[in-house]
Image (cartoon, coloured by chain):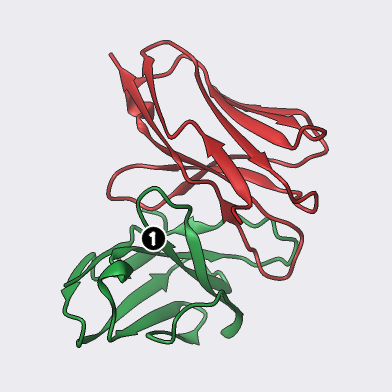
Amino acid sequence: ETGVTQTPRHLVMGMTNKKSLKCEQHLGHNAMYWYKQSAKKPLELMFVYNFKEQTENNSVPSRFSPECPNSSHLFLHLHTLQPEDSALYLCASSRAQGDGQETQYFGPGTRLLVL
Amino acid sequence: QQQVKQSPQSLIVQKGGISIINCAYENTAFDYFPWYQQFPGKGPALLIAIRPDVSEKKEGRFTISFNKSAKQFSLHIMDSQPGDSATYFCAASWQTGANNLFFGTGTRLTVIP
């Protein structure tokens, strides 16, 4: 248990569906991240929130919409996804001291399949 | 452009042997190099990390070797055990307000009894 939980753990959705992924951290961290993990590719950083403010959006398509209502919760809203969006979506958190060397703690991920 | 290149993609080692995974980077602004370990069904977990002011860091059976001039770093697992079977990711980041980690593509290690 890393202190970062993600729900659901598995999700199957059609291309016209709308769903949301949830992440919660119990570590008192103030930075949270969404990553996409696909087979044989590096983990791709999607979004970064620092003290609830979005600080990074790495050219992610608008069909992915993040929301960070407070420092402990992070959501990823999904709509009109494509089959190539099927992947493991990982949430992470860190203390965000600002020196780029904080340990990131990852959740177990949500395995997403888009049909 | 991939910021961090990792090899090999997969590795099979006999129990008790040494596992070696290599990474290379281009961006000289990187100043933090962590290794993450990921088991099936779990998220990556920090294993060991190094800063470029030292050439080696050892924690138990795990050692990072760092070559700043060659822009390369490697993970050595001594006395490899079946429980070490996992996917290993190297990563790199630089000093910034946001902790942007650039990951390698991962190495799937299998330690056979």
Q: In this view, does B48 lie above or below A77?
A: above
Q: What element carries label 1?
A: loop
Q: Residue at x 29, y 80 (%)?
A: A81
Q: Nearer the viewer, residue A33 or A78?
A: A78
- Tell me the shade of chain A: green
Q: Residue B77, position in %: x, y?
A: 51, 22
Does residue B10 appear to the left or right of B89 in the view shown? left
Q: In which quarter of the image is the N terminus of chain B?
A: bottom right
Q: Residue at x 39, y 73 (%)?
A: A24
How packed mark 1 is, by other alpha carbons closer than 10 Å (few <14, some 14-19, many 20 or more), is many
Does residue B73 appear to the left or right of B9 in the view shown? right
Residue denoted by label 1: A107
- Tell me the shade of chain B: red
Direction front: furthest residue = B1
Q: Residue at x 76, y 49 (%)?
A: B31
Q: Quadrant of the C terminus of chain B?
A: top left
User: For the residue marked with disc 1, what is the amino acid?
Assistant: Gly
Q: Residue A80, position in %: x, y?
A: 27, 86
